[in-house]
Amino acid sequence: MSEQTVTKRGCFITVEGTEGVGKTTNIAWIRQCLLAHGIEPLQTREPGGTELAEQIRALLLSPRDEKMAELTELLLVFAARAQHLAQKINPALTAGQWVLCDRFTDATYAYQGGGRNLDKQTISTLENLVQGELRPDLILILDIEPELGLQRARLRGEPDRFEQETLAFFNRVRAAYLDRARQNPSRYLIVDASQPLDQVQQQIKLGLDNFISAGDTAI
Ligand SMILES: Nc1ncnc2c1ncn2[C@@H]1O[C@H](COP(=O)(O)OP(=O)(O)OP(=O)(O)O)[C@@H](O)[C@H]1O
Ligand SMILES: [Mg+2]
């Protein structure tokens, strides 16, 4: 029998939160923290992450006159995710590389589930179909009053299709994120993103250091 080396799957870390909480800003910081531990993660984002999935992202985000049906939105999100997993995330994790992703399926439960009120069971069925058993090992939720996040996001320019939603929508999104974290606290790190950036970063670093030293993430 030929000898086989089994590579331990890389850890999968995702960063979540409503608009403008600082996901993209802090992904760069998380990368630095991981590098300090000798871990070079694959950094990516959703929706998107591959050429085709980025085209689906553009469909999802661009404002249009024709109303996108809620189910169309949900299926596009998962179509992009299937492509991203097949082309990028799964091969990296299988090769033992860590993956750091700006939004993932928690965002689907929060935006399409909480925000749009789509049935959680439908989302869960698609999650199982598209991901199999894969779930993130650590989910960082940057939590903020949606209004404050939207103010930050709007400084960047024209609002995308989601940024045009009401405050009530984003309050439901936020509540859905926090609800998921409450149901499975060991996988979630919640950081108050209304704090100055250096304090947000300090707390993220603490959480990551704990996660790494907790053990079965062996590098
Ligand atoms: N803790 C903070 N305090 C003040 N400003 C911040 C903080 N964190 C990020 N910002 C600023 O807020 C803006 C939005 O940050 P960023 O783009 O990282 O958010 P995001 O969550 O990725 O947004 P989006 O949901 O639109 O992708 C940026 O201008 C960033 O510099
Ligand atoms: Mg961003």
Image (spheres, rainbow, N blue to C red):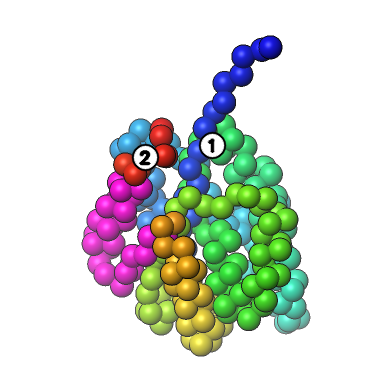
- Residue linked to disc 1: 9
Relative to 88, is 2 above or below?
above
Relative to 167, is 59 above or below?
above
10 Å crowding of disc 2: few (<14), some (14-19), many (20+):
few
Marks 1 and 2 sit apart, C-alpha to C-alpha, by 14 Å
Residue drawn at (53%, 49%) of the image: 44
Q: Nearer the viewer, residue 94 or 99?
A: 94
Relative to 59, is 67 above or below?
below
Identity of the residue furthest to the top in this view: 1
Q: Which image quarter holds the N terminus?
A: top right
* Kind of residue at disc 1: Arg
Q: Is residue 211 visible?
A: yes
Point out residue 115 in the picture as x, y percentages from the top left corner. Answer: 58, 79
Q: Which of marks 1 and 2 is nearer the N terminus?
A: 1
State the predominant SS element of the stretch in magenta: helix
First to last magenta residue range: 188-211
Q: Which of 139 and 64 is in front in this view?
A: 139
Residue drawn at (58%, 69%) of the image: 109
| Labelled disc at residue 198 | none
Disc 1, SS: loop
